[in-house]
Image (spheres, helix red, strand yellow):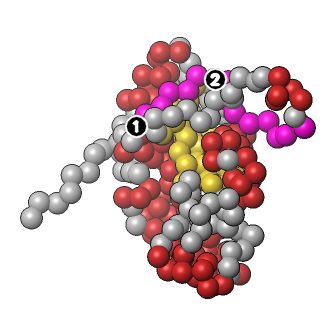
């Protein structure tokens, strides 16, 4: 039986975006944990120097790699990119802000951790949740909150983590860091099976919530059972 075809990632989209805006440093952003019942939404970011970037075709969507391979790639990605970071938005922030604003906040935190600021960004998916929304009168009247979002050009790429090396690298960084957090949380709350399900909505996770109730790391605004 023929094996599954694996698409090789390239720097094509990163170079094209740099050329389109006549810039040098391209950011790449991806998220993990958006659909989980517990734990943070986590966003990874890489920044690439398109004038001198070496290709890294072994990078793949984090979901296509074993946990061991993802972890081995982390230090290589950090050496390969000129900037990298992972940002998180807590379960409480997801409840308070909603998913889109929580993603934007986590993405802003990830980019703030990068040693080099991107001049344009590739974002995995079809919807730009990273750009700062236009403010309105209600925003001016609301209490001040942590600033989030970017003002540089953002280009969305559907299944970008399967095409773009920068996005694939970002997805690996986010996945490894979020999984490690969920392992730590699992030691504190072993009944939910987070070592295995990483906070996602498995049948056993929902059953544990039904039996033991939710904890402060669950997104209480979601349908948990």
Q: Quadrant of the C terminus?
A: bottom right
What residue is drawn where x is 56% and y is 62%?
36
Q: Secondary structure at mark 2?
A: loop
Tell me what residue is drawn at x 59 percent, y 63 percent: 223
Q: Is residue 146 magenta?
A: yes
Q: Quadrant of residue 182?
A: bottom right
Q: Nearer the viewer, residue 60 or 178?
A: 178
Task: Name the one closer to the observer, 222 or 74.
Answer: 222
Residue 60 higher or lower than 69, as above or below: above
Q: In the image, residue 173 lies at what x, y percent?
A: 55, 54
Q: Quadrant of residue 4?
A: bottom left
- Label 2 crowd (10 A; few <14 / some 14-19 / many >=20): few
Identify whether 135 is placed above or below 198: above
The location of residue 184, given as percent across then percent down, is 67, 75
User: Dot 1 lies on which element?
Assistant: loop
The crowding category of the residue bearing disc 1, from other C-alpha atoms within 10 Å (few below 14, some 14 to 19, many at least 20), is few
Please give left or right for residue 163 compared with residue 187 in the image: left
* Residue holding disc 1: 158
């Amino acid at each position: 039986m023929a094996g599954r075809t694996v698409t090789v990632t390239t720097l094509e989209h990163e170079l094209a975006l740099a050329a389109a805006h006549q810039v040098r440093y391209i950011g790449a952003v991806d998220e993990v944990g958006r659909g989980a019942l517990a734990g943070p939404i986590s966003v990874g970011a890489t920044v690439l120097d398109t004038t001198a970037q070496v290709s890294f075709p072994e990078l793949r969507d984090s979901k296509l790699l074993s946990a061991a391979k993802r972890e081995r790639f982390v230090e290589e990605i950090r050496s390969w990119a000129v900037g990298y970071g992972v940002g998180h938005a807590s379960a409480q922030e997801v409840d308070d802000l909603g998913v889109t604003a929580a993603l934007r906040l986590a993405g802003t935190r990830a980019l703030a951790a990068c040693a080099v600021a991107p001049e344009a960004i590739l974002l995995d998916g079809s919807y730009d949740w990273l750009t700062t929304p236009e403010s309105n009168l209600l925003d001016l009247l609301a209490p001040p909150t942590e600033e989030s979002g970017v003002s540089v050009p953002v280009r969305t790429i559907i299944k970008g983590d399967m095409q773009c090396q920068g996005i694939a690298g970002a997805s690996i960084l986010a996945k490894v860091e979020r999984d490690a957090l969920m392992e730590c949380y699992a030691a504190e709350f072993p009944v939910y099976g987070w070592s295995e399900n990483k906070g996602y909505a498995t049948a056993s996770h929902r059953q544990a919530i039904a039996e033991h109730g939710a904890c402060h790391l669950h997104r209480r605004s979601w349908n948990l059972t």
